[in-house]
Structures are given as C-alpha cells and as structure tokens.
Image (cartoon, rainbow, N blue to C red):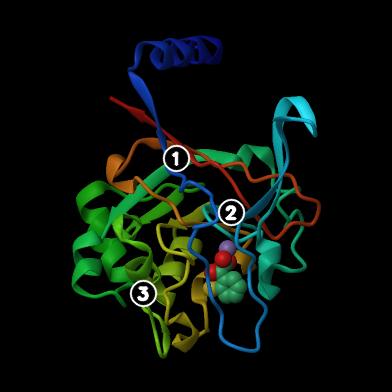
Amino acid sequence: MSSTQALADFAHALANGAITVIDLTQTLSEDTPLLVLPEPFGQTAAFSREEISRYDDRGIAWHWNNFTVGEHTGTHFDAPIHWVSGKDLPDNSVDQVPVSKLIGPAFVLDFSAECAADPDFLLTADHIGDWEAAHGAITPGSWVLFRTDWSKRDTEAYTNRREDGAHTPGPATDAIRFLIEERNIMGFGVETIGTDAGQAHLLTPPYPAHTLLHGAGKYGLQCLENLDKLPATGAILIAPPLKIRDGSGSPLRVLALVAE
Ligand code: 23J
Ligand code: MN
C-alpha cells in the first residue's frame, strides 16, 4: 500500500468511526491538583486566570482571559532539560523536541490492581517482563503508559500526601533502565503527578524516572487519564507540548487513536 493510500484510508477510518480519538487529558482549572515539594524547594504554580473582557465595555463582542500556569501543572510533558542529567543534551527543551517524536505508538501496562492494593507499588523490570510475555515486546520509539487507575481517585486520594510525603506508585530503577537500554522507548507516561513514585527520593538514584529518562533524551507525560479506555497495544499517541523557548515542560492535550 502506498503511503498516500495509507493516509487516505486513515482519513476514511476517522470519518467513519473505525478509528476513534480518546482524550487522555485532565481538565485544567483552578482545582487542578499540584505537586508539592518539601521545603525549601520552589513550587509549581496552580492554574489561575484573569478575565480581560466578557462581551462588556472592556470588549463589547469578545470574551478572553489571561492565564498563569506552571510548566509542570496538570496533564503535562517533561522535556530532557527539566532534569540536570539532560541539561547538556541537544534539542532538550519543549521547543526543540523533533516533531516526529510527538506522535508514536503506545503500550499500556495495566497494574491498577497492584496499585489499589499498595499505593507505593513500584513497577519493576520483572513486571515488564511478565507483561511482555503476555502482550509482546515493547517496540523502539514507543510511549510506555503505566496504568494505575490513579486518575479515578478524588483529589485527596490522588495526591495521597502524608507526613512523610506523597504515597503514589511509580517505576523502580531497574524498570526505567530496561525501558531505556533494552527497549529504547520514546517516553514514559503516568496518571499520577510525577513520572516517579511519591517516595522516589528514597530510591537509587533518587527520582530514577526523571534522572535516567531525561539523561537519555527521553520524555515524560504526567497526570494522564482514560488509560483504561486504551488497548494494551495498538494505540497511537499524539502529544505535542507548547513551543515555549527553552521550556522544561508544558501543559498539553494528549490524544490517543484507537482502532475499533
Ligand atoms: C520537580 C522536582 C521533582 C519532581 C518533579 C518536578 C515532577 O514530578 C515533574 O512534574 O516533573 S518529582
Ligand atoms: Mn513534570
């Protein structure tokens, strides 16, 4: 099949519903849950907005706002420049990520039952091996999405903060090493606030997902939802961040294409 024909077939499949579009994005609002780092670290800003006009004497026929938001607030993209390990890589900021990398296949690893039983669940290389034995090997250049069903929780259970910090699931160091070194993935996406577990400051190295993924030029996606609506394999992810000069990350809309 020619690639011209493949695109025509794709347009047809979108039009007739043979391919559906699933929104993996949280609604961004003043209520969007935030990452909170311990003192004395700086904090990401909540989403806020001010009205410029609403069909009134400030603008008789138009409604618009100015908004403020952290680069890492809500459903967002992490670029390699976000972490010190990726600071000297080429094309490491959101404006420089090659556009060909902003669309690619997704593998959805469902560990929601394990996470329901243990909020500090760590996904290991062995878990990924078990998953691949059932579903096939993760192919190079893919997004790996960690399904935890965390996005179904209310805000308090979602952030799950205690005296000693957040208790949310994430990847173990050996899982991230495996995905980089043995699978050469494009990036790792999660439903939780960070690509790392809530207690990942205690791992070696601390924050292994951020440290190793960004050091290898890979990307992160956080605060995804609707992962339960995706097949384990076969979906295509579209995840282009805003083109912020030297930006470390950005809120974005994340879409998945799924064959019926
Ligand atoms: C800064 C420091 C630690 C973490 C994070 C940011 C994130 O999770 C993020 O949004 O990239 S863990
Ligand atoms: Mn981030």
CA–CA distance between discs 1 and 2? 16 Å
Is residue 212 visible to the viewer in this orientation of the structure?
A: no
- In depth, the one of 31 and 219 nearer the eye is 31
CA–CA distance between discs 3 and 1? 31 Å
Numbered label attached to residue 77: 2
Disc 2 crowd rating (10 Å Cα; few below 14, some 14-19, many 20+) is many
Q: Secondary structure at mark 2?
A: strand
In the image, ligand 1 is in what quadrant? bottom right
Q: Say which of marks 3 and 1 sits in front.
A: 3
Q: Residue at x 46, y 45 (%)?
A: 25
| Residue type at numbered disc 1 | Pro
Q: Secondary structure at mark 1?
A: strand
Whether residue 14 is situated above or below residue 26 in the rendered picture: above
Which residue is labeled 1 in the image? 105
Disc 3 crowd rating (10 Å Cα; few below 14, some 14-19, many 20+) is some
Q: Say which of marks 1 and 2 sits in front.
A: 2
Query: Does 184 sit left or right of 114 as displayed?
Result: right
For marks 1 and 2 on the same chain, the one whose residue lies earlier in the sequence: 2
Whether residue 90 is situated above or below residue 135 in the rendered picture: below
- In depth, the one of 164 and 198 nearer the eye is 164
Mark 2 CB near ligand 2 (8 Å cut):
yes
CA–CA distance between discs 2 and 3? 22 Å
Q: Position of residue 48 (x, y in %)?
A: 64, 55
Q: Do labels 1 and 2 touch, CB within 8 Å?
A: no
Query: Does 80 sit left or right of 10 as displayed?
Result: right
Which residue is labeled 3 in the image? 160
Q: Position of residue 138 (x, y in %)?
A: 38, 50
| Residue type at numbered disc 3 | Asn
